[in-house]
Image: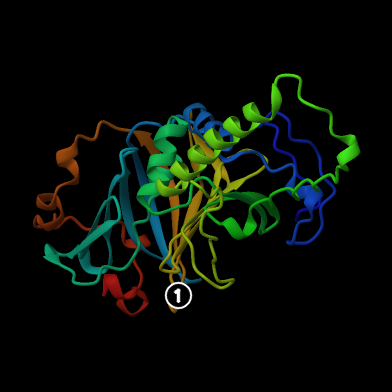
């Protein structure tokens, strides 16, 4: 898109005539600071009712095929989440996310390499800039970097990718001053005072150099053009999270926001893993819940599954199951 950027939730942004993905200095100048953006995102999270533990009832699909499983996802703003999937024949898969650690189990038996079906949806839940920044940095997102890019038919602020950030302004050129333009300093009394002052300043500079503070330039951050970075994409229109990128190449895309009473959540989300079919979860119901820390324990992960069968209409053939549900 980038044909017109409107971010009404951030003060000072205006309509911009943009075109293409590569932005010029004029467009980049309108990108807000990262801290202001995160404050606005947190405000949207609060108004959407997502700042406490949420329970989502899901329908799972693989690729373009019919639904193959029912799911229940509980996500906590502290960074804990769990997902239970009930698939063909009553089989139960469970996933547990604690920070960046993902665990999985099939019918109570732990999986060595769980499929990345459970992603950090708690990025949609922080209630303040501080908690949002902490959540992002726990997943190694460069939270001080913000840029602008297209995301489908929308425009998005992208947090975590310096390659998309607004460039620094050009340095102010130094002015050339002739000797005749310099006026004597009336505060400097004689040549001896000037020499003494110069000596003091020289000593201070030497001290700074010895302390490692003599240079104002840090190491240049070089990021390859094709490098995969963890990033957060936020719609410029409503400041809702649109996409989450992981350094592994896995990314999650969120659908439009829908309302369950006063709770605003994405209508669906898709998990894209390199080399695998897209996994789509449709959100059938969403409620706020009380989820204590013990609800996210390994005891729950490895507990024997309830033999109750899911809705037969939501079950496909076993050949349609992703590898985690076969």
Residue drawn at (40%, 31%) of the image: 51
Query: Relative to the observer, which residue lies in front, 25 or 107?
Result: 25
Residue 178: quadrant of the picture: top right
Quarter that holds the C terminus: bottom left
- The location of residue 105, given as percent across then percent down, is 18, 63
Quarter that holds the N terminus: bottom right
Q: Which residue is mark 1?
A: 274
Residue 277 lies, with reference to residue 218, above or below; the image says below
Residue drawn at (45%, 52%) of the image: 141
Question: Can I make out residue 91 in this image?
Answer: yes
The answer to whether 227 appears left or right of 7 in the picture is left
Question: Can I make out residue 50 in this image?
Answer: no
Query: Relative to the observer, which residue lies in front, 325 or 163?
Result: 163
**SS type, badge 1:** loop
- The location of residue 218, given as percent across then percent down, is 52, 54
Residue 294: quadrant of the picture: top left
Query: Relative to the observer, which residue lies in front, 101 or 189?
Result: 189
Residue extending furthest toward the right: 180
């Amino acid at each position: 898109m980038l044909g017109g950027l409107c971010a009404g939730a951030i003060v000072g942004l205006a309509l911009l005539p943009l075109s293409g993905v590569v932005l010029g200095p004029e467009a980049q100048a309108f990108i807000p600071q990262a801290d202001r953006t995160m404050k606005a995102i947190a405000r949207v999270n609060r108004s959407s009712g997502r700042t406490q533990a949420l329970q989502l009832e899901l329908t799972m699909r693989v690729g373009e095929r019919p639904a193959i499983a029912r799911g229940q996802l509980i996500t906590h703003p502290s960074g804990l989440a769990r997902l239970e999937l009930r698939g063909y024949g009553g089989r139960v898969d469970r996933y547990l996310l604690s920070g960046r650690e993902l665990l999985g189990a099939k019918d109570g038996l732990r999986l060595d390499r769980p499929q990345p079906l459970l992603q950090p949806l708690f990025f949609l839940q922080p209630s303040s800039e501080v908690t949002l920044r902490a959540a992002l940095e726990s997943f190694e997102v460069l939270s001080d970097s913000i840029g602008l890019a297209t995301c489908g038919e929308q425009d998005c602020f992208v947090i975590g990718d310096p390659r998309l950030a607004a460039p620094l302004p050009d340095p102010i050129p130094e002015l050339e001053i002739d000797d005749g333009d310099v006026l004597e300093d009336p505060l400097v009394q004689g040549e001896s005072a000037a020499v003494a002052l110069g000596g003091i300043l020289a000593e201070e500079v030497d001290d700074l150099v010895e302390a490692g503070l003599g240079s104002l330039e840090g190491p240049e951050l070089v990021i390859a053009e094709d490098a995969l970075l963890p990033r957060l994409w936020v719609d410029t229109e409503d400041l809702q999270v649109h996409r989450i990128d992981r350094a592994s190449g896995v990314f999650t895309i969120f659908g439009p926001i829908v309302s369950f009473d006063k709770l605003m959540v994405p209508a669906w989300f898709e998990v894209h893993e390199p080399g695998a079919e897209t996994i789509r979860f449709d959100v059938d119901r969403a409620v706020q819940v009380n989820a204590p820390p013990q609800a996210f324990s390994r005891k729950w992960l490895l507990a024997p599954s309830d033999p109750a069968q899911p809705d037969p209409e939501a079950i496909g053939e076993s050949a349609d199951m992703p590898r985690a549900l076969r």
